[in-house]
Amino acid sequence: MALLAVRDASVELADRTLWHDLCLELSAGERLVVDGASGSGKTVLLRAIAGLDVFTTGGCEFRGRPRREWSMPAYRAQVMYVPQRAALHPGTVADTLAAPFGFAIHKGKEFKAEAAEDLLTELGRPAELLASPTENLSGGELQSVLLVRALLLEPTVLLLDEVASALDPELADAVERVLIKWSQESERALVWVGHDPASQSRVGTAVLPITGPYPLMARP
Amino acid sequence: MNSLPISDLQLALAAGLMLVSVALSWRLRLGLGRDIAISTVRMVVQLLLVGLILDWVFSLQNPWLVLGIGLVMTLLAAHSAAGRPRRSYPQLFLDSFVSILVSSLLLTGLVLRGILDVQPWYLPQYLVPILGMVLGNSLTGVSLAVDRFTAGLVTGRAEIEGLLALGATRREAARGPLREALRAGMIPTLNSMAVMGIVSLPGMMTGQILAGAAPQTAVRYQILIMFVIAASTVLGCLLSLELAFRRLFDPRHRLRVDRLITKG
């Protein structure tokens, strides 16, 4: 059974249809690359799967159950969107990484600084990054922190939106290695959006091409 | 003892002071000249009219009529509160009205019945001025709180959606902006309480003293009214923020900044 499925989905904006009749299935161990020109709605697709944006038609299922049957926090704790960039609350990196463990949905999990240090090291960052204030992070460091924050919460599906776009090639390689290993460790899968064709082919086990946007179809 | 009367000429001299603001606005190109003129004229006309009808209002014996006046005052306060935030949403007027109505009427009623024990409870000489002071402060608090909240949602959108994406409930994700907004709504009241008596002698107390009341009594009234104002402001802010929160985050824990309308 597929972990995640999107069925007959479309997103219409005020003046255009981004895509329509979009279907995808994601099984454990799969790494799906979403490929499309900029402006084709790759980010909107990931955000809509995460429930941050809405599908105009269609919808998605997680573990065979329609999303509306899931409580949204429970669903998002499993199907986790990692943005290209996000603002972080003032404080240290460790504070930022620990904060989500205070959410009701993550009760029972515990923030472990060693796990965060290990992940940062695997991503090519010094463990001392944990103590630095979030205001001082470079764009690339921010991306590493966002990825670590998501991985520590042990989601089932990661929706990765250009998570290596601000990284040097070596660091981007490290991200790919970590994520490929992560996807093989247990019943997990990921969706990858990224510009670099070489990394697309290294990461992906399948490709979903999206074309568009289209002018809005006239309604009767 | 009665207050010294003020003649039309004396009022006109005082109005000349507004020209200072207008001149500064013009010199510094603040573009506030129009707003200052409109506010000035409005205030003068409103107060003169109120002076004309207050005699009649204070003679009212009918509780429904007094409550009706209170309702009109609340509607005007809600309209003013809803007009101020730079970002609005379609039901803002309704939400402001509900929060100001509940907080102000509740607290004013509590004072008139529970603390002062005015007889009859609707005695307009007490109800109208006390409600007016409470409304004025609530509306400032509500408009500041909502303004800060909506601004916080727009500027903090990336952070909030980042938290939602990690499984935060809408309330967990909104905690920061809600706290900031409540703080912003309470600051004017807290500031004025902090300097009261030292820097400022509040209007009501000054008025009572000018009209011949014993300073001891005037001070006690002022303390009482400040407690009522603080309580109704915090209640009004909490209510309006709760309502705004429910409009701007949907039950599926999605941030809906698309419902905000930014004023030009």
Image (cartoon, rainbow, N blue to C red):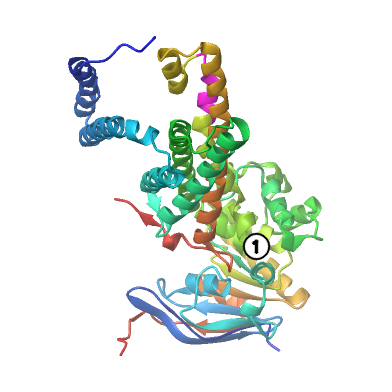
Q: Amino acid at mark 1?
A: Leu
Q: Looking at the magenta stretch, what is its main secondary structure?
A: helix
Q: Who's the residue at 34% across and 77% down the image?
A: A16
The boundaries of the magenta stretch are B190-198
Q: Is residue B229 visible?
A: yes
| Residue B54, x across and y down, in percent | 34, 32
Residue B196 belongs to the span the image colors magenta: yes
Residue B253: image location, x then y, percent = 58, 65
Relative to B49, residue B145 above or below: below
Q: Label 1 is found on which chain of the structure?
A: B
* Front-most of residues B57 and A127: B57
Label 1: which residue?
A: B166
Secondary element under disc 1, as helix, strand or loop, is loop
The quarter of the picture where residue A37 lies is bottom left
Q: Which corner quadrant holds the N terminus of chain B?
A: top left
Q: Count how many numbered circles sit on residues in the image.
A: 1
Asked whether B149 or B27 is in front, the reply is B149
